[in-house]
Image (tube, helix red, strand yellow):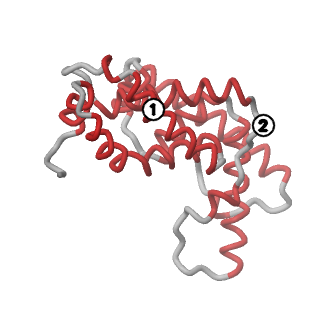
Amino acid sequence: MELLTDNYLMLKVRDGEIEKLGILFERYRTLLLNFFIRCTGNHAWSEDLVQDVFVRILKYRHTFGPESEFAGWMYRIARNTHSKQWRKRGRELQLREEEVLHQIPCEDPGPDAVLERRQAVRLLYHALDTLPPEKRELLVLSRFHRLEYRQIAERLHCDVGAVKVRVFRATREMRKKLLELVGECKRPPQALGTF
């Protein structure tokens, strides 16, 4: 099963073998879910978005060409889906640090370290939530999903230089927001480190 490439499977889906979409769904569901959770902060909404992406993949399968790269094509659909839903729902759903805290692995720390880490995560996600969706998406892709600039450029349909500049600006804005938030705290958390 692993020998079947994503592109091969998507070409089969495009040509009418709809059942092959199930394999792609299993391969990418968790990755997309994590992407959306970090963009929206809401697990239920993120689950809905993942479903919407695969419905759109099915609907627009005819646009997938032999020269296409599935992951990039899928992420463009995911971005468009998120963007449309964001405009519809506005900012009714804010990032919730409690929802994300359990996803971050930690090695049996002491109570002080746990408290410190929770405070750092709250600040991080609060700052991330204040960014415009485009900048938040860039940081999610580059920092959380650890995609290379080339991979991000493919997904955003722009050149690598533009991605570097956008990520730099988003990081600078995020750092500024974090510093503002840390300034509001009595004691800045050590776990925050440098963003």
Q: Residue at x 65, y 38 (%)?
A: 174
Locate residue 29, reporting x and y percent: 42, 47
Q: Nearer the viewer, residue 17 or 173?
A: 17
Tell me the tag on residue 55.
1
71 lies above or below 166:
below
Locate residue 190, reporting x and y percent: 67, 64
Locate residue 44, reporting x and y percent: 63, 49
Q: Residue at x 17, y 52 (%)?
A: 1
Q: Residue at x 39, y 29 (%)?
A: 57
Mark 1 Cα shell of 10 Å, populated few (<14), some (14-19), many (≥20): few
Q: Quadrant of residue 99?
A: bottom right
Q: Nearer the viewer, residue 117 or 54?
A: 54
90 lies above or below 178:
above
Q: Are marks 1 and 2 in contact (CB under 8 Å)?
A: no
Q: Given the image, on which type of amino acid does mark 2 rest?
A: Glu
In the orientation shown, which residue stands out farthest toward the left? Answer: 3
Q: Quadrant of residue 48?
A: top right
Locate residue 40, reporting x and y percent: 64, 41
Secondary structure under badge 2?
loop
Quick check: 20 left or right of 110? Answer: left
Q: Given the image, on which type of amino acid does mark 1 rest?
A: Val
12 lies above or below 24:
above
Q: Nearer the viewer, mark 1 or mark 2?
A: 1
Tell me the tag on residue 143.
none
Q: Residue at x 63, y 29 (%)?
A: 85
Q: Nearer the viewer, residue 31 or 165?
A: 31
Q: Work out whether mark 1 precedes mark 2 in sequence or the reverse, and give the earlier one.
A: 1
Q: Which residue is mark 2?
A: 92
Q: Nearer the viewer, residue 184 or 32?
A: 32
Numbered circles on residues, count = 2
